[in-house]
Image (tube, rainbow, N blue to C red):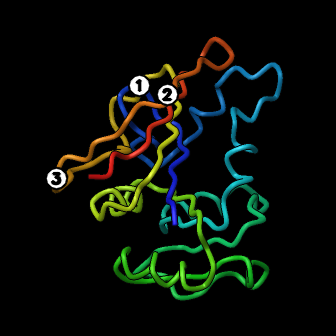
Amino acid sequence: MANYVFIATSLDGYIADADGGIEWLNDIPNPDNSDFGYAEFISGIDAIVMGRKSYEKVLTFGSWPYELPVFVLSSKLDSVPGELSGKIEIIHGDVKELVGQLTSRGYRNLYVDGGMVIQSFLNAGLIDEMIITRVPILLGDGIPLFGKISNPIKFNHVKTVILNNYLVQSNYTRITE
C-alpha cells in the first residue's frame, strides 16, 4: 500500500487561513483551466482518507466532487447526509489499524487529505509520497500542513515544476530505512 499527499500551501506553510478558509486558492491565475496535475494524480488512487474539518469544508462546495470512496477520520461524526450514503464512510481509531483495515478491503493507494490527518499519517510513518504545490501568498496564520513530529522523517526530492509561472509544485518520496 502507498499513501499520498497532494496539497497546496501558502509560502508560510498553511493549508487554510486562521478561520479554516481556502478562498485564497481561488486567486490562483489559471488561464488554461489547468488542474495542475490533479487528474493524473487521482487516476492512480483507490480511495481518499480525510479529516472531519476537510470533509466539512468539502460539503460547502455545493456538490460532492469525489467519485472515489471517501473515508472520513473523525471521533465526533457518526453519520453522513443521506445523499452521500455509499460515497462516504466515517472511520475512527488509530491510523495504522485503519490503513490495515483499508488494505484488507482491497484499497492499495490512498490520498490522504487534511492537516491533522496528514500529520497523524506522517507521525505513524505512513506517508510515502507528497506532492506539495506552493502558492505565492503569505497568510501569516492558519492551519499548518506540518506540525510537531515525533522523529525526523526523511524524503527524497523527485522533481519540481513551475506551473503557470505562478505555482511551484514539488514531489517528494519518503526514504525508508
At x 49%, y 68%, the residue is 52
At x 63%, y 79%, the residue is 106
Which label belongs to residue 57?
A: none
- Sequence order check, earlier mark of 1 and 2: 1
Quarter of the figure with residue 105: bottom right
Taking depth in this image into account, of 38 and 14 the one nearest to the observer is 38
The type of residue carrying mark 1 is: Leu
Which residue, given by chain and number where applicable, does mark 2 sit on? 134
Residue 96 locus on image (x, y percent): 36, 75
Which residue of the protein is positioned furthest toward the front in this rendering? 177
Which residue, given by chain and number where applicable, does mark 1 sit on? 11
SS at badge 1? loop
- Sequence order check, earlier mark of 3 and 2: 2
The type of residue carrying mark 2 is: Arg
User: How far is mark 1 from mark 2, CA to CA?
Assistant: 6 Å
Label 2 neighbourhood size at 10 Å, few (<14), some (14-19), many (20+)? many
SS at badge 3? loop
Contact flag, marks 1 and 2 (Cβ < 8 Å): yes
Which residue of the protein is positioned furthest toward the right in this rendering? 32
Taking depth in this image into account, of 24 and 171 the one nearest to the observer is 171
At x 49%, y 19%, the residue is 136
Which label belongs to residue 151?
A: 3
- Sequence order check, earlier mark of 1 and 3: 1
Q: Is residue 33 above or below residue 20?
A: above
SS at badge 2? strand
Q: Is residue 174 above or below residue 12?
A: below
